[in-house]
Every structure is written in structure tokens, then in C-alpha cells.
Image (tube, rainbow, N blue to C red):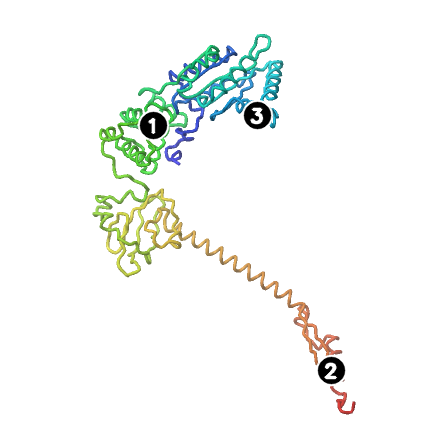
Amino acid sequence: MYESFFGFTGDPFRLTPDYRFCFHHRSFRKAKAYMEYGVHRAEGFVMVTGRPGTGKTTLIYDLLANLRKERLRVIQLNSTQLEGSELIRMIAFKLSLQADHLDKASLLRQIIRCLDQDYRSKRRAILMVDEAQGLSESALEELRFLTNLEKEGQSLIQVFLIGQEPLRDMVRRPVMEQLHQRMIAASHLSTLNEKETEAYICHRLGRVGWQGNPSFEPSLFAVIHRLADGVPRRINQVLSRLLMFGFVAEKRDFQLADMRAVIEDLRDEMLLPADIKDVDKLLDELPEAPEPCRSEWQRFDSDDEILDGDVAESAETVSPARREPLIGARPDAVSPDSDTLRFAPMNDSRGASARNDCAASRKGEEVVIRAPVAQPMLAHEIERDADQRIFPSVGGRAASADLRRRKGQRLLFGLVGLLLLATIVILAGSQLQLAFPESGIGIRVSALAVGTHPESRPDFAVSKAAVEDNRARPAVDPALN
């Protein structure tokens, strides 16, 4: 929504992982280096952990993008509380094996056969398990068994475990000692510090063509870092709402007061993280936010708004308790670049002078109303909803031209329908039969004979003679029979 308003080529703060936007901060570079080291070793386990939203999935996609030229078969799994047998079946499915109605032993044989074929074709297999903290002990034991598969001293498959912080405690249990001994590298993705938060925001904005629009007050980054606790996904959430606030309020310079309005909205919507305990304290430290501008057409509702040098009436005093339909209100023609519309005097259904919900000033007998240029309402919608109080700034000429075009289309369709109806009547009339049952004589009327005298036609002359002959015969008395 706000991309075109700020001139962006895309959305810089989407919550979906996108490796094209990944920010290589200190902890991210270390974790990626450990994963690349594990790929080079081609054996054992590599583990990466981190808090939710720190970029673990983005790290996987970034690593795989750099390994496209390698001869690797990458098997990606998203773990959701899988047991051992379920995990084996999921691996077989990812290898495109026919795993339906097969027992565990048969599945393992097919997996081993597939991995052996990859080894013969000089290709290695890598298993990426995301959200690995959901794996059970039996599933982890099955993974350990797969890493024991080898051919001529070369492991047939390597396993990468990526998950949240509880995964570190899982692999350090005494029952996981054999798996822990096969761990060749482990790294933890930490959150961003204050400087990295500012660099992260500028980096993602720069990926969509940001050149200073919008601008940010320098102290704003410290508040964002404190609110998001340095978690990249939380930063994306806060920045996305801040940019949306600027789009609605048409602001291109963000201050601390704007950040306060965004925080209050997130708190009211219960979208703030539950682990942030000092939200009220943070709001007390920020300056008072302006009146929230929920929609663009409410931006002139404040009590002290001044229009064209006149004192505007406040929304509390001018808004009626019950909205009445406006009668006879039509906007005059204005220039497309203007955001001011002028209306004739308006009366409600009771004959009283109507007062508009938005700020207005009266000059003589006309009412001057401010309507935002970006408001997408069409002027012809007043025909459907007479209670609309604000008209767009596209101008009365554009609205009336649209109405004239629609009326012309309806008139054209009506004329075409009449022509079709006339054609059908003419074709049907050409086959019309006029019959005289008493005389048993029929006269065929043809549309082709229009314009010729009926007595000049032979069939008409014969029919006339037959009628006269029939009349000359004497009537027979039924009683004689």
C-alpha cells in the first residue's frame, strides 16, 4: 500500500523470510561461516539456534542460494512434533520415493538405495531440518543413524539442525551423547544491538530504492530497538506499521510523537510482544502523539482547524446526533489539482440547513469543504448513498462526464434493441396469413407486394371472380333435403 507513496520498488519490511533482504550482521556472518564449514566437511551434524524471528530460515535460504552451483541434493523439512517413523516417511517423500503402505525397514532400504545412487553420480545429500526443536528423541536417533551411512569412507548424508534455543538443551541430554559427539559445528544467532538495528533498517530500505524519503528522527532508532528487543522480525512489524501510519497521515518525516501513536495502536490491538514489560514507561518517555488519524477524511476534524481565514466549527458542535441525507448538494467544477470543493447550500430531510462532519467555513451562501486528494471515492456514488458528506477532488467536470457517458451508453443500447425488435416484426409479417373461413378463400399478404395495386395481380383477379360466382348461385333450402 505505502510503497508507491514513498517511491519504493517493493515492501522492505515483510514478515516472510526473503534472503534478498538478509542483513549480514556479526552474528549472522558467524552462523553462515559455520554452516559453510559444515558443508565443506561433508559429515556429521551442524546446529544453528536462535530466538524466534532472528533470521534462521533466512540464513538457510541465503546459504542455499550460494550453493546452487554445487552438486548437492538438498532435502528441506519443517519439523512439527515428528516421531522417528514419521520422520523417515517424510524423508522418503522428499526423495520422491513410493513410501505408501511400506513399513519402516522397507523405507530405510529405499532411502539407502537412493543415497547410494547419488554417491555414484558424484552428488551429496544434505538434510535441512527447520524448527528442529520439535523433534522427539526417537526422531533425533533416526537422524543419527542416517549420518552413520557411508560409502568408501564418505558419508552419504549430512544433517543441519536449525531451531530455537531449547534445541541446545535437547542435544546435551545424556541420552543424546552419541549425537552430540557427531556435532562438528554449532552457532547461535543473537539479536541486534542498537547500532545494528539502525543499520538493519537502512539496509532493507536501501534494497527498495530508499533515498531519504521518508526521513527518520535519529532518536527514533533507539526507541525501535528497545521496543523490538533487537529481533529482526519485530523490527519489521514496527517499521511496517510506522510506514502505514505515514501513508495514512501523508507524513514523510517521522518523529518520536509518530512512534508513540504506532505503539499505542499496537498495544490496543494486542500485537506487542508479551515479554515487553515497560511499554507504559516507554510511552511516558515519548512526547504526546497527535490525534490519531484513522482515515484521510478525518484529518480536518480537530476543534482548532482553520480554513481560508475563517474559524472552522468543531466536529463536536457541527456533527448532528443523527445523520440526515443531504438534498440538492452537487459539487461545482474545480481544477484536478485542487483539494477544495464548493457546494451549494444543503438541507436535510427536515428542511434544516445541513452541517458537515468535516471542517467547513461559510462564505455567503456557499460552503467550502476540504476533501483529500487521495480519497478514492467516486462522485457518482452520491447517487447510491445520499448520506455521503465528502466528495473527491477529481472535480465536478470529471464526475458529470462520467454520468453523461453512462447515459449515452444506456441510450445506445436502447436504440439497438428497438432496431432488433423492428427487424423481427418485419420478418414475421412477411409470412402473415389472412383467412376467410365462410368462403374458404384465403388471400396471402406478402411484404414483397407492398406498393403494387392488388387488382393488377393474377391471383387476386382469379379469387375475385370465384367470389362473384359463388354469390350468383341460388341458395338451397335445407328443408328440401
Which residue is the site of mark 2? Answer: 467
> 148 above or below 280?
above
Residue 78 appears anywhere in the view: no
User: Residue at 41% of width from left, 25% of height from top?
Assistant: 207
Answer whether labels 1 and 2 touch (C-beta < 8 Å).
no
Q: Is residue 196 left or right of residue 312?
A: right
User: Residue at 56% of width from left, 10% of height from top?
Assistant: 154
Q: Quadrant of residue 273 in the image?
A: top left
Q: Nearer the viewer, mark 1 or mark 3?
A: 3
Which residue is the site of mark 1? Answer: 212
Real-space CA distance between mark 1 and mark 2, rounded to the nearest whole angstrom: 103 Å
Which residue is the site of mark 3? Answer: 93
Element on which disc 1 rests: loop
Tell which of 78 and 289 is nearer to you: 78
Residue 247 location in percent, x, y? 34, 36
Residue extending farthest to the front is 175
